[in-house]
Structures are given as C-alpha cells and as structure tokens.
Amino acid sequence: MLTEISYTLGETIPKWPSNPSEAPYIIQSFKNGDPCHATSIYHHMHNGSHVDAPKHFSINGRGIVDIPIEDFYYTAPVLITLRMGKGELISRKDLEGFEENILQADILCIYTGYSDIRENDPDAYVDDFPAFSADAALYIRNGFPKLKAIALDVISFDSSILGPKDGFPAHKALLDTKDGLSSRTLLLYEDINLKILSELNSPIQTIMAFPIRWEDAEAAPVCMVALS
C-alpha cells in the first residue's frame, strides 16, 4: 500500500514565522476566457514538507542538485515515537533507548505527536514546537553510519525560540562540515505527516522522498511516500 506522508502546499499552510507565504498567480484561466488554465507559484523552499541539503547550513556543503537520487530512496526506514511537548528538545538520552533499531536504519522518522495540532491549531503548531538538541544531533550523525536522513513531524530541527538565539545548533550539527565535524552529513526532512505513518497496521518497507531540483538551491519540496 502507498501512503503519502507529505502535506499539500497552499497559501495558509503553517510555516516558520519569518518565512514568506506561498502565493499562486493565475496566468490564464477559463473564467477569463483563456483557452487553458495556467498558474505560476511563489514558493519558499522551507515551507511545507521539504528536505534540507547540507548547503542550508554549510558554506561548502552540497546543494539539492548535487545529491545522488538514490539518497532520497530508503529501504530500511525506522519510525520511533517520542511524545514531546511545547518547547521540549529531543536529547541524546531520549534516542539511546532506540539505538539497536536506529543502527539498521537508512532513514529515521521521529513522531513527536506535536503535529496532531497542525490542522486545528496551526498557530500553536509553529509556536515553540519541540525540536532537536545539539547533543542528539551529534549522537545521530556520529553513531549511525547507515543513516542517510532524518524526518520530523515539526517544521524545523531547531527551536523557533532557541534556534535563532544560539545559531541553529541542531542544523549545524547535522549539516555543517566545519569545526572538526566529519564530512558525512544527513538529509533533513521537516513538516512530514508522521501521524499517518504511525497509524499504519503493516510494516513500512520503503520510503521515497524525491525533491524538485532547482539549481543552486539548498532545499526542495518533496513528495514523500511510504510503501507498506
């Protein structure tokens, strides 16, 4: 069974507070007597379900066009549930209990449960949501060589409160290659519908999350689909 776990884009989707909004521009329409319907869209790469490439937080990091297509295809997905509340940070200790499972994974999906409010309370969803701590990020990056990517059910790996103040430590710990960090980085998927994934009755066999590639871009929207 195929299950889409990325969200539909639109003008009113929840987003990082300072991001510009999505905006459609109707170029031609039947209503105006045109022979077809044609639309242009303004899209911010970090709105909605998307993937961050290393270039997002690494000066010499790979952009979205530099990453092999197979890095967006996962045959050993692991989903874990870590119920997190407003403002809480995922710590290394939170993840250590799942170490055996994560060691076999090529993508780690972390369902915090915070996304349960995305539809009914979008303002709360983007306000001080749970995020990653730097120590959890370094633990994941350094300890799990098979892992290619992490997916979260919130809009960012860094806290909207602490992230800007502290220099976005979780993103840097996972994407940057400076300051003694290894050259191995991970892909980061944000704002993913992991609630629906957690409700599936059959094991997840494969996850595909292919990006729309734009030259020189540091991120891209994705259509993320699980096969169970």
Image (cartoon, grey):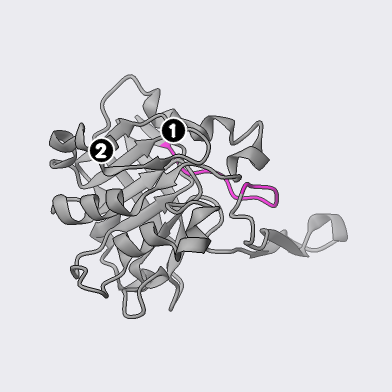
The x and y percentages for residue 57 are 39, 70
Task: Give whichever of 162, 110 is nearer the camera.
Answer: 162
Residues in magenta, as a range:
4-14
Quarter of the figure with the C terminus: top left
Q: Position of residue 96 (x, y in %)?
A: 20, 37
Residue at 41% over, 57% down = 51
Which quarter of the picture shows residue 180? bottom left
Residue shown at the point (66%, 31%) measured from the top left: 120
Report the amino acid beneath label 2.
Answer: Lys
Near mark 2 (Cα within 10 A), the count class, few <14, some 14-19 or many ≥20, is: few
Q: Residues within 10 Å of mark 1 (few under 14, many from 20)?
A: some
Q: Is residue 70 above or below residue 150?
A: below
Report the side of 219 relative to 76 (left or right).
right
Residue 36 lies, with reference to residue 79, above or below; the image says below
Question: Between residues 137 and 145, which one lies in front from this camera angle?
Answer: 137
The amino acid at mark 1 is: Met
Q: Secondary structure at mark 1?
A: loop
Which is the main secondary structure of the residues drawn in magenta?
loop
Q: Is residue 162 magenta?
A: no
Instruction: Tell me the CA gap for discs 2 and 1.
Output: 13 Å
Residue mark closest to the camera, 2 vs 1: 2
Contact between labelled residues 1 and 2, with CB atoms less than 8 Å apart: no
Which residue, given by chain and number where applicable, does mark 2 sit on? 93
Is 9 within the magenta? yes
Image side of residue 194 versus residue 41, left or right? left
Residue at image mark 1: 84
Q: Position of residue 93 (x, y in %)?
A: 25, 38
